[in-house]
Amino acid sequence: MPCHPARARELINKGRAIRRFSKGVFYIKLMDRSDGDVQDIACGIDPGSKREGYTIKSEAHTFLNVQAEAVTWVSKAVEVRRNMRRARRLRKTPCRANRKNRARGCLPPSTRARWGWKLRVAKWLAKLYPISMFVVEDIKARTKGQRKWDTLFSPLEVGKAWFYNELGKVAEVSTKQGWETKQMRDALGLKKSGKKMAEIFEAHAVDSWILANSWVGGHTAPDNKNLMCIAPIRLQRRHLHALQPTKNGFRRNRGGTQSLGLKRGALVKHSKYSLVYVGGTSNNRISLHSLQTGKRLCRNAKTDDCKLFSVSTFKNWTSCPPEQANPIARS
């Protein structure tokens, strides 16, 4: 359960707890526990097409506000893969025969990636907090007045139905309509910013806070506007052929999830660049990238100069307003 930072330091100094670090969040693990009482904690989720908000809240405190970037590149990647496959079949090269057009029998790749990312974030938060309820703003697709499209063929409707089913295996799920969220926001006198891409509490986290507060109650105004921003790291698939041929028929390495024994996306501490994450590899060296922007800082780092902290598939950074105090520690 969450506790005050002073209490966390006391437990660590007495040897009753040990330090832990999970994908940008520091917490402590208790070595002994006298009771099993926990508070009711809700997780509010505000889905979006580019950004989305998550809030972890109890009746007494708001523990964590998260703004996540959505997965938006899968549809284009699938199109490039399809074009590359067709180009290989037109050349006189050995390849497998065309298969029949089989029914996919599952979610489309872009829909699966988009809603799967939401589910991974929710499961990660559920490992840090004893979440009792997920309160999700129910979004609806553009309807056409046709039953098959409205309920069966719309990727949004199919994706959210799969998401609710999988999320229900973690904790109970409650949904709110968009107009209900707006009514609760107006009743508390809170405003939502029109800058959807801004890294501020009022962009998306205000709605996720409203959703969580609607179940646990306890506040009429946000007590914590500190914002943790996360963005998924795009791991390239292995390419059988590059888009453009190279000289002398040489095929360079492309894609994969390992760089000289380190997981790509892993959080490491470098002697020069401090906290960064691992990228690709070339000439027995690895590239390091910024946690905030993803910009490549170098491409010739040695693995011996990097200290591994944790393995993650997303980068994270914080955005805190100056008037807010430090967030409460987690345990």
Image: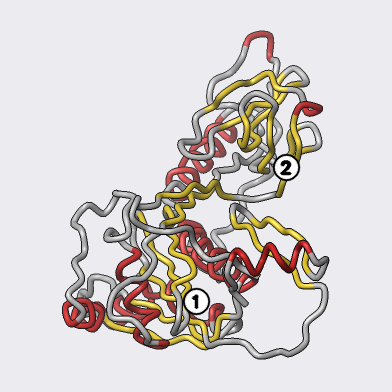
Judged by depth in the image, the label closer to the viewer, 2 or 1, is 2
Residue 188 x, y percent position in the rendering: 21, 79
Circle 1: element type: helix
Question: What crowding class fits label 1: few (fewer than 14 Cα within 10 Å), some (14-19), or many (20 or more)?
Answer: some
> Which amino acid type is marked by label 1?
Trp
Q: Are marks 2 and 1 in contact (CB under 8 Å)?
A: no
* CA–CA distance in space, label 2 to label 1: 29 Å
Residue 171 x, y percent position in the rendering: 56, 85
> What residue is shown at x 69% (from left), y 43% (from top)?
96
Question: Where is mark 2, residue-wise?
Answer: 263
Closer to us: 231 or 21: 21
Residue 22 x, y percent position in the rendering: 66, 57
Question: Where is mark 1, residue-wise?
Answer: 162
Q: Is residue 281 above or below residue 145?
A: above
Q: Residue furthest top?
A: 248
Q: Where, quadrant-wise, is the N terminus in this rendering?
A: bottom right
> What residue is shown at x 61% (from left), y 27% (from top)?
273
Q: Is residue 196 left or right of residue 268?
A: left
Residue 261 x, y percent position in the rendering: 81, 37
Q: Is residue 144 left or right of residue 124?
A: left
Q: Is residue 311 above or below residue 281?
A: below
> Which amino acid type is marked by label 2?
Lys
Q: Where, quadrant-wise, is the C terminus in this rendering?
A: bottom right
Q: Is residue 245 left or right of residue 266?
A: left
Circle 2: element type: strand
Is residue 319 at all visible to an observer of this figure? yes
Question: What crowding class fits label 2: few (fewer than 14 Cα within 10 Å), some (14-19), or many (20 or more)?
Answer: many
